[in-house]
Image (cartoon, rainbow, N blue to C red):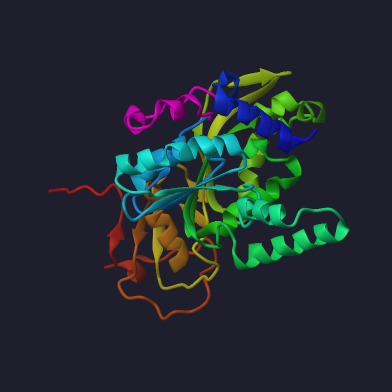
Amino acid sequence: MNVVKNVLDRYSEGAKTRQESLCCPVDYDSRSLANLPQEIIEKDYGCGDPSRYVREGDVVLDLGSGGGKICYMAASLVGEQGRVIGVDMNDDMLALARKYQKQMAETIGSDRVEFHKAYIQDLALDVDAMENYLQEKPITNAQDLADLDAWKSQHKTQQPLIADHSVDLVISNCVLNLVDEKQKAQLVAEIFRVLKPGGRVAISDIVSDEIVPQHLQQDPSLWSGCISGAFQEYEFLQAFVDAGFNYVSYDKWDAQPWQVVEGIEFRSVTLLASKPLGTECIDRGHAVIYKGPFAKIYDDEGHVFIRGKRMAVCERTFKQLIEGDLADQFIGVQPHELLPAKNWCAPHGTERTVQETKGGLISTKTEASCC
């Protein structure tokens, strides 16, 4: 089965006439849709709304941006200091998105969106640039093919489409399941590469409750229909953990499956994850208190957080917990005086004494005045 051709053909048809079988019901904020062209709304295919995780000032990368709906929604949220990059491999979808670029720039006040032709599993390669190269130097023999490979390698190194550590938020709406099974690990690694330290992921996609058998994966209609290429629900999370992300979780999880094929349930989820701020562990005396409700929790780096205890963490972990998406679960306790910087971290499960932390600034999202 030619995965790329089947997907391109299916979505080219979707750019011309609406394909109901390509999308799940999604509860979008009507205010976010108010300024969008009706054609983009009608020809959008997705299973979630990752735009709700966009923050002001973000550089946002939308993988498989299609007709541009989520990109334009994000553009209205990032503000004057932010920008949005959409990548897609389908010429018809890119044409639809670009058709309204000038109109949308006037609507939101500036042109904050750009669209590029690219493979989402190879974000360094500018496919438009490669196609221009091929027009000038078509491949007619083995040497030409070797020259193309050399050009791609040089281009990706010297002029990557999406540079390392350049994006604040990667979003996607029901597209990762369209990537060939053998390239899914590369896809997640590319997401990690382009994110800034501390960058975030918000990906809506379809997952299965069981591993999809080979005979279903070989069905071109099920694959291009966002079904048989789905990650298994546990493996989707684990793929991001294996790539080096932390705080990987499901935010949205549809109770009812979108489709059931041969007893396998396929449903829409939204995965959240963060790229670590770095690898350096420097203990400066910070602590966090896990609020509960569980007696004890662990993160993927091995930290132990005991409910109500002042647990020692390095400066990096403190910043990511207290300033990140998990801030409502932790109370941050900064030391009264920073310890001298040392490139080491207290063993996991170490408690800070009250005497070590007394007088330090307390940070919590749920602070309330008692008087």
Decide: is 186 above or below 348.
above
Quarter of the figure with residue 309: bottom left
**Number of callouts:** 0
- Residue at x 60%, y 20% (from the top left corner): 21
Residue 302 in view of the camera:
no
Residue 237 position, x and y percent, is 61, 43
Left or right side of 253 for 337: left
Decide: is 261 above or below 142.
above
Left or right side of 42 for 120: right
Which is nearer the eye, 336 or 245?
Answer: 245
Residue 285 in view of the camera:
yes
Decide: is 272 above or below 257.
below
Left or right side of 329 for 147: right
What is the quadrant of the N terminus in the image?
Answer: top right
Residue 121 position, x and y percent, is 65, 49
Residue 38 painted magenta: yes
Range drawn in magenta: 23-46
Residue 116 position, x and y percent, is 55, 48
Residue 352 painted magenta: no
Residue furthest front as drawn: 136
Residue furthest right as drawn: 142
Q: Main secondary structure of the magenta part?
A: loop
Which is nearer the eye, 282 or 168?
Answer: 168
Residue furthest left as drawn: 371
- Residue at x 34%, y 62% (from the top left corner): 333
Which is nearer the eye, 288 or 93?
Answer: 93
Left or right side of 20 for 212: right
Residue furthest bottom as drawn: 340
Residue 166 position, x and y percent, is 49, 60
